[in-house]
Image: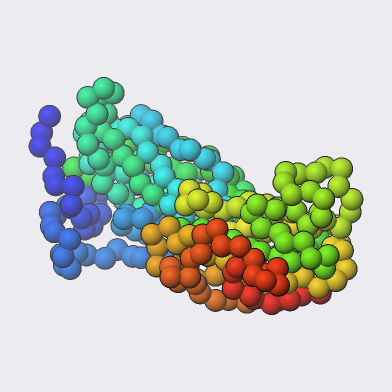
């Protein structure tokens, strides 16, 4: 097999069906720009954005396998990973949704796998916060060094709304892989967090399908123990009107997970309407691990606001 270019090449241009590559170090600032892709529904980290549809398939290599741990993603999710194998002449991979977006992304392929006889690929991607909800076909097409595109392989991705549905929803969203926790104190004094995921006083875990009306439940404990799940969002959801009274809200940085911290937004919605929105930032130094409540029974996090229902 002919020699392949260095892993630190950049794809400079796509014109007339041909790819142009250049080898270069990390400090190379002369690379051509074909667009940022910041308004695309999918953003491939480390990839180069090119406007337009995928070029028509020709004599390029095939995509043999597509591997994804989860084909359901949430608006705003980040660092999901796709991987697999392509024909041994593949130098790069082109990626875009078939039905949404205005262009595609190009990423270099990886190394030769002697077991399968394929060239491997693996890349992380983000989903835009405003990406259309629904099932969308993701197209992957391999490209050789002569700019020949192969037939597109299709993976169906389901994009779910970032905001859960419910009568009342209190959501925490943040922008890093840190382990943040949404914390509430109910009118009865019950603390709700990852360890105590419902507002029910006698129940501290699991879903109680026989619970009375007026109870809220935490939908997930995102990035728990630094196991990044790509959501960076968690909400307490009431499917029926909450128990009347005042609810206090905190945000706690349990673990920075080797990040500098996180910027966050807390949003309170009733029947889909935003009642209140508060933003802030926590730094790695604020992480407190398993710190307990203070002498007044308040959680260890940063107090945000109180709301009444």
Q: Is residue 64 above or below residue 301?
A: above
179 or 151, nearer to the observer: 179
> Could you tell me which residue is drawn at 48 percent across and 65 percent down?
287
> Is residue 305 at all visible to an observer of this figure?
yes
The answer to whether 130 appears left or right of 103 in the picture is right
Residue 298, by quadrant, is: bottom right
> Could you tell me which residue is drawn at 43 percent across and 70 percent down?
285
Residue 295, by quadrant, is: bottom right
The answer to whether 181 appears left or right of 144 in the picture is right
Q: Residue furthest top?
A: 115
> Is residue 272 at all visible to an observer of this figure?
no
The x, y position of residue 81, in whole percent, is: 41, 45
255 or 12, nearer to the observer: 255
The x, y position of residue 239, in whole percent, is: 81, 55
Position of the N terminus, as image quadrant, is top left
> Could you tell me which residue is drawn at 43 percent across and 57 percent down?
257
78 or 39, nearer to the observer: 78
The answer to whether 248 appears left or right of 264 in the picture is right
The answer to whether 205 appears left or right of 301 in the picture is right
Position of the C terminus, as image quadrant, is bottom right
Q: Is residue 290 above or below residue 114?
A: below
The x, y position of residue 308, in whole percent, is: 81, 74
Q: Residue furthest left?
A: 3
> Could you tell me which residue is drawn at 22 percent across and 36 percent down?
111
């Amino acid at each position: 097999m002919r020699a392949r270019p260095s892993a630190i090449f950049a794809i400079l241009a796509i014109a007339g069906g041909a790819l142009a590559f250049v080898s270069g170090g990390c400090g190379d600032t002369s690379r051509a720009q074909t667009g940022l892709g910041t308004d695309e529904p999918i953003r491939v980290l480390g990839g180069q954005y090119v406007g337009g549809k995928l070029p028509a398939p020709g004599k390029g290599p095939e995509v043999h396998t597509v591997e994804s741990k989860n084909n359901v993603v949430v608006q705003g999710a980040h660092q999901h990973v796709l991987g697999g194998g392509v024909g041994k002449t593949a130098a790069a991979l082109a990626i875009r949704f078939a039905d949404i977006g205005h262009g595609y992304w190009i990423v270099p392929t990886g190394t030769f796998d002697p077991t399968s006889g394929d060239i491997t690929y693996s890349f992380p991607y983000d989903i835009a916060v405003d990406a259309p909800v629904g099932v969308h076909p993701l197209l992957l097409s391999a490209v050789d060094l002569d700019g020949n595109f192969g037939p597109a392989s299709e993976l169906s991705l389901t994009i779910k709304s970032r905001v859960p549905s419910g009568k009342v929803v209190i959501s925490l969203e943040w922008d890093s892989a840190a382990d943040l926790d949404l914390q509430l104190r109910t009118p009865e004094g019950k603390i709700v967090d990852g360890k105590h995921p419902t507002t029910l006083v006698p129940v501290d875990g699991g879903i109680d399908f026989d619970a009375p009306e007026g109870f809220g439940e935490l939908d997930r404990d995102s990035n728990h123990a630094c196991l990044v799940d790509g959501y960076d969002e968690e909400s307490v959801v009431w499917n029926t009107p909450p128990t009347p009274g005042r609810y206090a809200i905190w945000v706690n940085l349990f673990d920075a997970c080797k990040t500098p911290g996180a910027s966050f937004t807390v949003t309170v919605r009733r029947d889909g309407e935003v009642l209140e929105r508060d933003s802030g930032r926590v730094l790695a130094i604020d992480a407190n691990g398993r710190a307990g409540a203070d002498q007044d029974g308040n959680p260890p996090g940063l107090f945000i606001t109180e709301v009444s229902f």
